[in-house]
Amino acid sequence: MAECKGVMICAELADKKLCAITTELLGIGRILADDLGEELSVLLMGSEVNALSQEHIACGADKVYVVDDPLLESFNSDAYTEVAANICRQVSPSIMLLGQTDMGRDLAPRLAARLGGGLAMDCIDLSIDPETKLMLQTRPVFGGNANAEMITRNARPQMATIRPKTMSALEKDDSRQGEVVAMEAGVDSSIIKARIIETVQEEIEGIKLEEAEVIVTGGRGIGSAEAFEIVRELANVLSAATGATRAACDEGMAPATIQVGQTGKIVGPNLYIAIALSGAVQHLAGCSGSKHIVAINTDPDAHIFKVSEFGIVADYKEVLPPLIEKCKALMAE
Amino acid sequence: MEISREVFWNIEYGLLVYVGLLLPLLIGYAIYRRYSLWQLGKAEDRFEQGRIKAFITEAIGILLHKRLLGIGPLPVSPRELYAGAMHFLIFWGIVLLLVVTALVAVHDHVVKFMHGTPYLVISFLGELGGILALAGIIMAGVRRYVQRPDKLDSKLDDAVTLVLLFLLIVTGFVLEALRISATVPTPEWERWSFIGFGIASVLGMEKVSLLPWHKGVWWFHVIIFYGAAIYFCLSWSKLFHIIISPVNIFFRSLRPKGALVPIEGIEEAESFGAEGIKDFTWKQLLDLDACSNCGRCQDNCPAYLSGKPLSPKKLIQDMKISMEAAGNVHEEEPRALIGEVIPDDDIWSCTTCRACQEVCPVYVEHIDKIIEMRRNLTLTQSRMPEALEAMVGNLFSRGHPWTGAQFIRLRGDWMEGLDLNMLGEKKEIDTLFWVGCTGALADRNAEVTRSLARILKSAGVEFAVIGAEEPCCGDPSRRIGFEILFHEQVQQNIETFRKNNVKRIITACPHCFNTIKNEYPQYGGEFEVLHHTQVLADLLRNGKLKTGGGGEFKRITYHDPCYLGRHNNIYSEPRYVLDRLALPDVIEMSRFGRHARCCGGGGGRIWMEEPVGTKINRMRTDDAIETGAELVITACPFCLQMFEEGIGAKGPDNTALTALDIVEVVEKGLA
Amino acid sequence: MNIIVCIKQVPDPEIPPVKFQIDPEGKKVIPPDGVTPVISVFDERAVEAALKLKDKYKAKVTALTLGPDSAKAVIRHALAMGVDAGVHIQYEAAGELDSFGTAHVLMKAIEKIGDYSLVLCGRQAADWDAGQVGLLIAENLGIPVVTVAKKVDLQDDKLRVESVIQDGYHVMEVSMPALVTVSSEIGLSRLPTGIGIVKAARVKIENLSVEDIGADIPEARCTELIKLYVPVRDIQCQIIEADTVQESAEELAVRLREAKII
């Protein structure tokens, strides 16, 4: 497969801006491309997105393939899959990277199926093996209990999705030069089999989890939706976002939209306060990017203490009221 | 003049009393009407071998009122003694009266024998019977209408019954007095009829003028008797317990006390347990009529005593209403048994502790009925408390009942560092130490398990364990009504035991013990099953274990686990074990032995929430604290957990009580 | 309506992390003794989604699994929950297949079962967490796919699926046949019922080999596992223990402040 060359990333936009994941993809893509001595290209799909090409170059891209079509206004799996497959067939990249996001989760496997590439999802580390020049993909498996290192030996492209907040973006450099290539979408609306009829935004009170510097999360041990209020109260005092574990969401103590974990939100705040949660690996997969973790749990053997910096072994009902008061006092100083 | 008297003296048409011979017909009709209600139920074989012998043995105890008077090793409370004495007086009083009356009839028609001393003795016995019955009836009236204990709810029938009985006996005495007064001359020997003679001396002797009065009262007495008999038969009065109770006792369960009945043909069934009243067996329906509403069950029910809506007495009485509705073709749509007549919460409140059945004078089987309804709820309707769903889910996917998103322990963890034989490794070992899920998985209970393993090893007992692969015994599934799971678990376990040539099983958990000992035989699994208290008692008896120190506690008490005590009659072994140790004497709690209050953990309750009323385990903890003991000893992993929770809830400032399993106490007390 | 649900047997994902062991040589997980494998949680939710449809409309639900002999336990589980039929593609080396191989075999099995309107899969399996198989099957079958569903319903012969996204959900409409991957937001799955268990025991699970369904296991895998290891975390937790819980709580706030974390 000598004809496959170069690293391509699939850009993701929100409100006509680059998503954080796109800059992270460019960051790791740049490293891989440099190690291979090949070019880093971007597949930019959207409507009226030409103006964003330069920003991709500033963040590390050598070439931007722009597919500008009204049909691509927002992410639609059928259209995006078809277009991305078309472009990949034309460009034949050796490596294709996407984000482990709503879009990447959907698009990457479908693309891999169409292109016959090999795919590793939700990678937390990517590198080039110096000898074989193959991409080494590290991804957590078994809910985060283990890491697996994978390669795609023969199939091309070697595809991977990367977990948000695990790769560093490059410093933006507006002086960087690159090429912008306009491409045809070559599809019409008949390609769309699964139509989005409505998008429902679920209101989340307060700060968004992905953007929060501090997160206070409650687990199944909180006990009830009413009892969850005190978790929110601590979050308010600390200007933090509120999170919940899957178990807590499943039992109706908190809405699924604030679920932190492998299948919920992946977060990386400065401080993560874990209350009445045992620290299932699936949960830690969503918060292990946090800089400081504090745990409050009645069970001294709870796994969460193994990843925490500070801990209190006690009933949260007794800990939180004085903690809230003390924090209030300290924050007021 | 001969010492005797003429029957029907002063009475013409006296032979009319023999219309009474028609009474059996009336009674038969009344019973037949009820019999057709019992026939609404399903078939059940209660005609096993040995039933007659068992009945006769039991009948002696019943005639002596053993249960009611607390005769035997375990006494009853003063209140219960009062009720027992009351029943004893009424029962024997009326028996005497009936016997005397019958003898009079024999004298009149068969053999004239009431002359001289026999006549005097019989007169005296008649007086005695009347006075006993009267005393009992007055006691009953005082109890029901003055003392008004919580367990009695008085209906019109109760008042009518008491008044009728009272009138019958009083008119009987008055009648006798009038006869004595009006007889000229008054025979001296009538002093033997001391009550009648007493009243007669007030009326004055040799008063022929009283003859019409005598006649009047005689007829009044007879009419009341027939009136009462007709009333009792047509209203199916509680007095029918005189007939139904012996019948019910005759047909009582001869199963081991701790064994539930399997669901027949479970693999082909389309619905399970009892959804309506007709899904119970005829014996379960007979129970409903045998219940005389005495309230002893309610008085001993831990759920009722802790403020739950369940009362075993009310359960039976409500089910009786359902049965009557089901038999009444005119009733449009009878209320649903489960949910309407008996709320779900009542069904789930039961700890299956057997306190109700142990005290029931007529052997009503409350637990079987509750389990039948649970079976329907869990298996047919899939309706159970949320916490139980989690437990069942766990049993399904993990093979044990303990929840935990992250269960910290695995089933084999407790064995670490003990160097034990694994089952199947050495063919010659035929003794299995069955640990149980709780003993293997709950941290606190695992300490007990380890302690027991060390003791057994040090005493030279050769045993093997199953370790990480040990499944659940099936007790939790069965007690919550999830019979199908039990059905699978038992068969698998029996196969494992047989495959590994297991002959003897030592258990650390009374629930496992009860299930394997009493319920596995239903599936052909007959093994020698021992609870650790029995093993420890044996080892101490044979000197395999030598006692030494361990006397750090000044006051100790012992809690009888329900499935060890009431369900399996193991009361003395644990006490013997404690007696052999260098410990102070056991101070018994107010409710102990057969009357011990349940810890609240049985019948699947340990996995359920307990939002209503006081928590049972905290009441039991208070019972222990009341004795002034510093140490409460038990022999069941659930009880231990329940005590620790109760003690924890009290807080270290309020109690110095510690809870230990008897195994731990033994290990401390060994030389 | 005929629904096929793909389910997988996985090692119990709730094994405590301290008990989790791998064999680095064999690149395999060593399941601890006495821990029975379970149905993957998202697959169980997929069964629930199918049964919800069955409750509401008439549907025949078939559970399909690929795995070794032991995997028939998950079919029994699904049958006990209420599905109507079970197909077990028995393949002892199923664990060695990558997502592409697995999807290929399942696709063949689905074609063999035939006459389906809807295929349901869990969003990802609780062991390798790849989250690819559902989408790959759809691509292989050439049918539309909707992922991460929190609700699956019918409207005028079409599927209405609520698909979870970052801050809410899309309401998607898709004609059948289609494939939907199901997420935990669909709600807790029902327990097996007594009747279900009894009936499940009477259902004969169809046991097929990969040859029976005409699947050819590819010689070379697309992706290859070259290393499996347990990541080390070296954090020493400072447990704050003051005389009272209140003092501990206050101490915690002070420490966080001192470390300039808050």
Image (cartoon, rainbow, N blue to C red):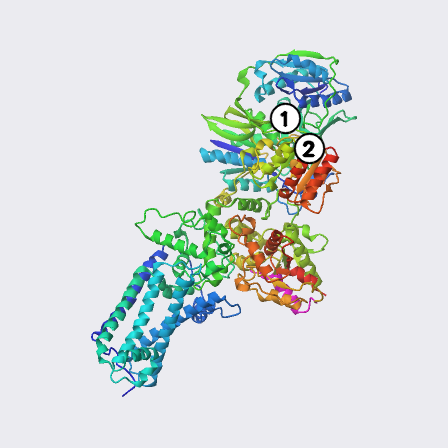
Image quadrant in which the C terminus of chain A is located: top right
Give the image location of residue A96, x and y in percent: 68, 22
Pointer 2 local density, CA inside 10 Å: few below 14, some 14–19, many at least 20: few
Can you tell which mark lies on residue C187? none
Can you tell which mark lies on residue A331? 2
Tell me the SS state at disc 1. loop
Chain name for mark 2: A
Image quadrant in which the N terminus of chain A is located: top right
Give the image location of residue A250, x and y in percent: 57, 37
Q: Which amino acid, mark 2?
A: Met
Against B327, is A297 above or below?
above
Between B76 and B437, the one nearer to me in the picture: B76
Between B402 and B12, the one nearer to me in the picture: B12
Tell me the SS state at disc 2. helix
Mark before the other along the chain sequence, 2 or 1: 1
Against B134, is B375 above or below?
above
Which residue is the extreme one toward the front? A333
Q: Which residues are magenta?
A: B525-546
Question: In the image, what residue occupies the spot 37% across and 53% down?
Answer: B321
Point out the frontmost of discs 2 and 1.
2
Look at the image and say whether residue A227 sits in the magenta stretch: no
Give the image location of residue A220, x and y in percent: 60, 40
Q: Are marks 2 and 1 on the same chain?
A: yes
Look at the image and say whether residue B545 sits in the magenta stretch: yes
Which residue is the extreme one toward the left? B12
Can you tell which mark lies on residue A101? 1
Question: In the image, what residue occupies the spot 67% across and 31% down?
Answer: A214
Pointer 1 local density, CA inside 10 Å: few below 14, some 14–19, many at least 20: many
The quarter holding residue A147 reads: top right
Against B107, is C95 above or below?
above
Is residue A249 visible to the viewer in this orientation of the structure? yes
The quarter holding residue C76 reads: top right
